[in-house]
Image (cartoon, grey):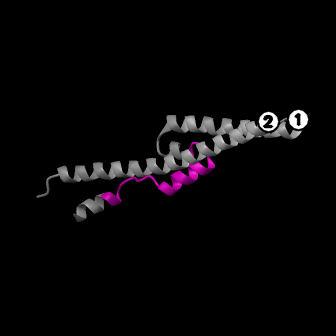
Amino acid sequence: MLIIFLYLDSLNYKSSKKAVLLSTFIPGGGQFYNGKTLKGSIISLTDISTFSLFLYNAYKYNTIKQENYYWSSIGYFITFFAVKMFSIVDAYIDSKMINAKRSQEKIENVIKVPIY
């Protein structure tokens, strides 16, 4: 049993805190950290585009004062916020799943090794 715990200490775990912080401050950063490049690219593109559209519509509303720009900016901000929250939660869950999978693989490898 002690051998299993010693092997678990030597694993290359993904830090959940690091994944969450990267995902919070860098669009798609947590997904890239976890090795999910396609998901990170999609989230980055969506995050940046919805925030840009929010800023554009907020600027247009402040200069032209048309109500449709106001509601569009609110809609884009809500979409940006939803994508950001999804990104943060997804990075946390992915890091936990990666760590669980690596622990399971390591335990299976230790069990397969005959002990004399």
| Residue 82 rendering spot, x and y as whole percentages | 60, 44
Residue in the image at 47% along x and 41% along y:
35
Residue in the image at 28% along x and 62% along y:
5
Pointer 2 local density, CA inside 10 Å: few below 14, some 14–19, many at least 20: some
Check disc 2 and report the residue beneath it. 69
Left or right: 77, with 101 as reference point: right
Q: Which mark is residue 31?
A: none
The amino acid marked with disc number 2 is Tyr
Pointer 1 local density, CA inside 10 Å: few below 14, some 14–19, many at least 20: few
Check disc 1 and report the residue beneath it. 64
Query: Vertical placement of 65 versus 110: above or below?
Result: above
The amino acid marked with disc number 1 is Ile
| Residue 30 rendering spot, x and y as whole percentages | 53, 47
Residue in the image at 69% along x and 39% along y:
75
For the record, the magenta segment spans: 8-29
Q: Is residue 19 magenta?
A: yes
Q: What is the CA distance from the residue labelled 2 to the residue labelled 1?
A: 9 Å
- Quadrant where the N terminus sits is bottom left
